[in-house]
Amino acid sequence: MSWTLPEEFEAAGGVIRWARFGDGEDPIVLVHGTPYSSFLWRDIAPALAQKRTVFVFDHLGYGQSEQSEGQDLTLAAQARRFVELLAHWQISSPSVVANDIGGAIVLRALLLEGAAYRDLTIFDAVSGGAWERGLFKLMRTHPDVFDQLPGYAHEALVASHLDNATHLGFRPEVRRAYLAPWLGPDGQAAYYRQYRQLSESDTRPYEARLGQITVPVKLLWGREDRILPPEYGTWLHERIPQSELHWVDDAGHLLQEDAPAQLLSHLFAGVATA
């Protein structure tokens, strides 16, 4: 499936690819997680662009952005790059939407790196607490073992990990698109490189500040999320007292895939103030 990010931003560690859709008022930035890319937003971004200016990008080390040995792919580094991207785009207070580790990245940028948002929508996201779990914890703890998997075994592992994120399942061509950046020797190395560097040590420093967030916050959570089950949504809601929390039935970790219409409905509706 065709999805191209035509623009480039030269960041420390490599080139970040990005794209802009629409020319409406009130910019909105869509932030993906792992092991995905901005391809997640392929249906959401054009729909939002009917009314707003939409920015999408691939984190360094992901998707169409540069992958290379030695890159700093920690949540802290990605948060700093996010602030740099906002400055590069010359948008001072956009709406921000984030999923998976994108949640931790935008929260860290807001609470520790000086970013400013108009409002914030987070769904099925890493945010804080004890989130190193399951297969992710194994890959992070034993990256050298996973690095040595035969190509066919690695592909099967990534495919099953992707499938675990959706309640309704991927169409075959969509699944292939998510797999593509992680295949071959370079892709396999990049896959475990980024997991090796994701750590709760980068979310703990801002946890105590979550209650200080003053912009409107909307939380969405798929009731069938197997990667970050609903209790993670409750955990975050309790720590951002003025936030809204909405449950999404028959949806897993990726609302973009399982419930795009409901996700768009929330994004078009905006975020209600406390």
Image: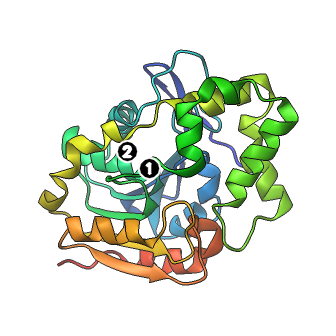
Q: Is residue 44 left or right of residue 233?
A: right
198 or 21: nearer the viewer? 198
- Which residue is most to the bottom? 249
Q: Position of residue 103 (x, y in %)?
A: 39, 53
Looking at the picture, which amino acid does disc 1 mark? Answer: Gly
Q: How is the image coloured?
A: rainbow
The residue that mark 1 highlights is: 102
Q: Is residue 24 left or right of residue 192?
A: left
Looking at the picture, which amino acid does disc 2 mark? Answer: Ile
The residue that mark 2 highlights is: 105
Secondary structure type for disc 2 = helix
Q: Position of residue 243 (x, y in %)?
A: 25, 73
Q: Are marks 1 and 2 in contact (CB under 8 Å)?
A: yes
Disc assigned to residue 197: none
* Up/down of 176 relative to 17, above or below: below
What residue is at 15 percent from the left and 52 percent from the top? 209
Q: Position of residue 242 (x, y in %)?
A: 18, 73
Q: Residues within 10 Å of mark 1 (few under 14, many from 20)?
A: many
Quarter in which the C terminus is drawn: bottom left
What residue is at 75 percent from the left and 68 percent from the top? 169
Residue 25 in sight in this render: yes
The image quadrant that residue 210 belongs to is bottom left
* Up/down of 58 relative to 1, above or below: above
